[in-house]
Amino acid sequence: MSRYSSLSRGPRIMMYSQDGFGLGHMRRTTSIARQIMALRPDVSVLTMADSRLGQFFESSDNHDYLKLPSIVKVGPGDWRAVSMPMPFADVHAMRTELIRSAVLSYRPDVLLVDHMPHGAMGELLPALAALRESGADTRVVLGLRDILDSPEVVRRRWEVEGAYEAIERYYDTVLVYGDRQVYDMAEHYGFSPAIARRIRYTGYVCTPDAPRYVARVRAKYLAGAAPGTRLLVAMAGGGADAYPMMRTLIEALPAIRAEQPCELLVVTGPFMPRDLRRDLEARARAARGAHVTITVSDPLSYIEAADVVFAMCGYNTTMEIMRSSTPAVLVPRSGPSAEQRTRARLFAERGWFQLVDPDELSVAALVAATRRGLAGGPVERPRPEGLRAAAEELLSMLPADAAEPLVLMQPARVRQVA
């Protein structure tokens, strides 16, 4: 008899993450999966995802990935295939069937859906309906970052796409990876009382990793520099739309260095178009003290090593900076979503970050922001500690016969909406 046939059915969690042109959703989903398995090593997790950079997220014992054909959103309700030379309708049909088949075959105890209650263009709805019709006792959970888009855009698109109806019909719980005092999701996005009662605010979610080589980063980029030389670091997650911020920062470097000796490291991200990355590399070679790399193995070390960080305002990058005390300047993306601009504004109002609006991005603005960051010193910010709370909430939904004590750690708090 095969050793696999003798294995009993352990508790199962499935996750859906649509992130065909970025890293953010996959990074958050993977962090939650890792935290779940740290608390409950007997749980199996299967992640359905379409990230083109699946190799960035290594599988581990009891955790595997199902790769969907990648698609990307080019505007509200407008999608295309990333790599497959096929009509979007054909790719969408393929993804829909793959998701439905995987859900019914895996039979999860908990299904965590990231960001899209109905899936990209409704691709999750057949799977959710099939689960209901099968009589499976699966708890279905929606996980949402703190801010999705402007309220008017979310309300309009969710009405058209049936997202509100999908939550009411299929979802047991809505986890919000944010702070209600900063952004009340139910109020801004017009959730019905029935949906609002299902919301749990976990707090902000960030990778559980710790910086590994802060001193090594400073030694590498400040080797041979004059005493008092500062390190500036620019990063933007996947980097698909980071070119304007990074180009302007390199252009600002001579003026910054005229006031304060410094070195600049630009981390473009793997999704910046090649021609734009090469342009930044050429500009850096021509500018004294500038360095360009595509990725780094430990972004947290670079954040801690920097004297000032420049970043866009994607959720995960912002949370990684939030857990540090490094002064930071946020330059949110200009569109098509209002998500980053909204987050940057709210966080800047609380004194956690400086904000340079993308419409006001200039050499002068970045020189002034650098000056303030270097003069201000360490910044006090609330630490994002919602990861454990999110994992505990999901584990609490496992069936009683799968119950097992959690690994004892400092209790986390999940805030339920009154």
Image (spheres, rainbow, N blue to C red):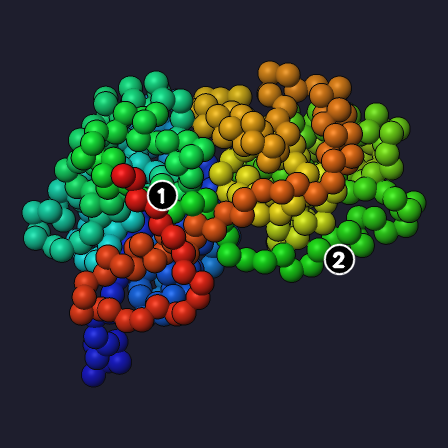
User: Does residue 297 appear to the left or right of 92 in the view shown?
Assistant: right
| Spatial separation of the CA atoms under disc 2 and disc 1 | 37 Å
Label 1: state its secondary structure. Answer: strand
Which dot marks residue 201? Answer: 1
Residue 135 in the image: state x and y as whole percent.
7, 53
Q: How many residues crowd around disc 1 within 10 Å: few (fewer than 14), some, or many (20 or more)?
A: many
Residue that lies at the very extreme toward the top in this rendered image: 359
Which dot marks residue 216? Answer: 2
Which residue is depicted at the point 58% across and 29% down? 348
> Which amino acid does the dot numbered 2 rest on?
Arg
User: Does residue 144 appear to the left or right of 254 in the view shown?
Assistant: left
User: Does residue 244 appear to the left or right of 1 in the view shown?
Assistant: right
Q: Earlier in the sequence, mark 2 or mark 1?
A: 1
Q: Are marks 2 and 1 in contact (CB under 8 Å)?
A: no
Which dot marks residue 86? Answer: none
The N terminus appears in which quarter of the rendering?
bottom left
Q: Is residue 276 visible?
A: no
Residue 251 in the image: state x and y as whole percent.
77, 25
Residue 168 in the image: state x and y as whole percent.
17, 36
Q: Quadrant of residue 397?
A: bottom left
Q: How many residues crowd around disc 2 within 10 Å: few (fewer than 14), some, or many (20 or more)?
A: few
| Above or below, 92 relative to 205 | above
